[in-house]
Amino acid sequence: MTKQLGQQLQITLSEIANLAQVQRPVVSMWRSRSKNSADPFPAPIGTSGRQELFNAADITDWLTATGRGNNPHAAEDAAAFSSPLGQDSKHTHFAGLTALIALRCLMDMPLGGHNAEDLVDFADEYDPDNEFLFTEIENLGPNLLPLASYADLLTDASYTAAAAFEQLLGDRFRAGPAVQAKTMLTAEAIELLAATAVELTAGSEQEPVFTDDGGSDFLLAVAEILGEAAPATLCVGTLASESARLARRRMLVHGRSKENLHVTNQAGTVRQEQVKVRLAQFPSPSFPTSDAVEVLTAIDNISLEMTHQECAVVLAPAPILSDSLLRTTHNREAEAIRSDILRSDRVRAIVRLPQGMLPSSPRQAQALWVLGPAHADVSIADRWTMVADLSGQEMTASVRADLVGDLAASMGNRDYVWAHSFRFSQIVRTRSLLANQGSFTAKLPVLEKPGRPSQASTAQLIDAENLLESLSQSPSEPLSIALSAESRTALRPTTVDAAIKSGAVKYLPGHRIADNHVETELSGRAQLPIIGVEEISGELPRESRKISQLVFANAYPQGRLSEPGDVIFATGAHAGAMVDEVGAAVVLYPARILRISSKSPGGLLPEVLARDLSGWTGDWRQCPARRMHDGAKPALSGALAAVAEERRRLAVRLQQLDELSGLLVDGAVQGSFSVLNFGMTTEGTS
């Protein structure tokens, strides 16, 4: 660190400890013990409130001369732990400093060497509509150049502009206005809301839209989950909002605002067909109140503004969202608003989270609401809500992943809900929540899965027996299948996604095979059949397309073949599924493989899974996968194998009949042969 740098920076005793990578009392010990030494601790140059201020250059020189501390790069890192000398503090000019760091990123060069007029011109050039930094830089006035130099120093000391920006943001929350510190969430809470928002858009064919009503923490976490390649639109609130301007600067510095970040207060900029997820925290820096009526009114407004393509993830104190409200006049108004929101059937899930999500109030529990489209086809009396209480749970990655899965499942229809294996949640009737005077997440009557009426079971048995009798009267051999009435309770279905996570099913993607490697008339023994969308749909028979085994081995060294029992399926417009009974085939993308574990199948059977997937049009991972008891599997597998064999035999016979029909026509017309009349009479003959 140069002497000129030190003359620009001031540092407190706490910041010295952080710079030297020691505990705060160690600095006080250095100071007292070095008073009468040859290298006394530097004297303070001023105070800020009760804190003494020191010249950063004097401190780094003293650390170097005495060898104190655990940071050999203290001189280079000093700017990250100091404040500009002569300014009130870096917190006073927080907006201007973050704007300067954003401008430095846009210019892709240090700010030093430019005069104030040039920097304002650059700000106008990169922000012509004044959406995120022009006003902040222009308002710095005579402080512009000193702070520009400090922005350079801070960025260099932090090694990246993003790290420098986060340093300023963290300092602002720690030492800024109380509302900012009070609304700061833990990383676990931010990741939970972001992961939930992303999961709610899974399977959508439209580009999702994410909006953060409170700032940029949620959006940045969403962007991290999606990655650079995933298409998405990120919206950060209204144009005039200070938090929206800060959010845009932050996203830009993190490299997330190239083409997909929008700041708007006009809903019309989002296409109607896009899936939109709103993330909101109450209270937040832009909505600092914690009043129950105001919070619930804001959530009610979100609910009323939602279209059928929108959903929302809302975080607020548990006493407002999930707990029993105290019986006061004010809270009766809040309770009425909360009940109205529940009656709208948009609250799909209510989760009471563990304490500690809000560092400023570690004992206050937060709660989560997930809002989605109402079920128009469900009567008011039959509406349901997913509830969960995670009090006392540690929010580990595993817990977060399972909770996110539960929340995503809560958005589905009745089949989705019953197909999902909830880890933390239960499904209750919404009317039970409305009638309950206590906590929403307390023990309430669980909505049981509706059982199949016995009349329907009997009808299924009769239909199956009638069909077997009809088939036995055909020229083909009768099927060796016998049925008997059964009253065994069916196992609860799972989903494909849950089966994959449990290890019962393994997912394997299909291969992208070059067109010139796909053959239709390949001869010889060294060949592999190809199974793609056409084979699944029945447009092409198996082994009508093949690839040379040698070509496959050389061109696709990481390639894999199917195994007997693999469920090969396709999604989208050509959705369908089949069981590969033979194996040793190359699965052609976009077809994919689901391979049921032979050691722990979890009650799954390939033929059943294929049937479930064949009729499913939604996200394949959320497809309900029916399960059955192990003792019933062998008989069903044998019966299905007999049906498949009969189907193959009839397919061969049908192909032979088609071929015979063509030969009869061609031979008779061309005079190659004549068709004899074996006792058949025609009109006009005797």
Image (tube, rainbow, N blue to C red):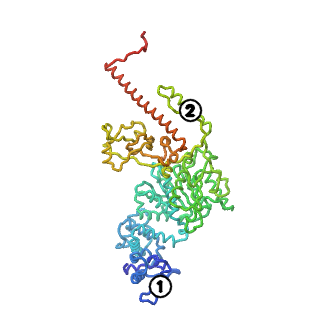
Q: Residue at x 53, y 71 (%)?
A: 177
Q: Residues within 10 Å of mark 2 (few under 14, many from 20)?
A: few
Q: How far is disc 1 from disc 2 in space, using C-alphas?
A: 92 Å
* Nearer the observer, 337 or 462: 462
* Nearer the observer, 478 or 469: 478
Q: Amino acid at mark 2?
A: Asp
Label 2 sits on a secondary structure element that is helix
Nearer the observer, disc 1 or disc 2?
2
Q: Quadrant of the N terminus?
A: bottom left
- The residue that label 2 is drawn on is 463
* Nearer the observer, 271 or 455: 455
Q: Residue at x 34, y 17 (%)?
A: 674
Q: Earlier in the sequence, mark 1 or mark 2?
A: 1
Position of 12 with respect to 414 (left or right) is left
**Residue 572 visible:** no
Position of 275 with respect to 72 (left or right) is right
**Residue 543 visible:** yes
Q: Position of residue 84 (x, y in %)?
A: 43, 77
Q: Position of residue 337 (x, y in %)?
A: 63, 56
- The residue that label 1 is drawn on is 31
Q: Amino acid at mark 1?
A: Arg
Residue 318 is drawn in which quadrant? bottom right
Q: Quadrant of the C terminus?
A: top left
Residue 199, placed above or below residue 488: below
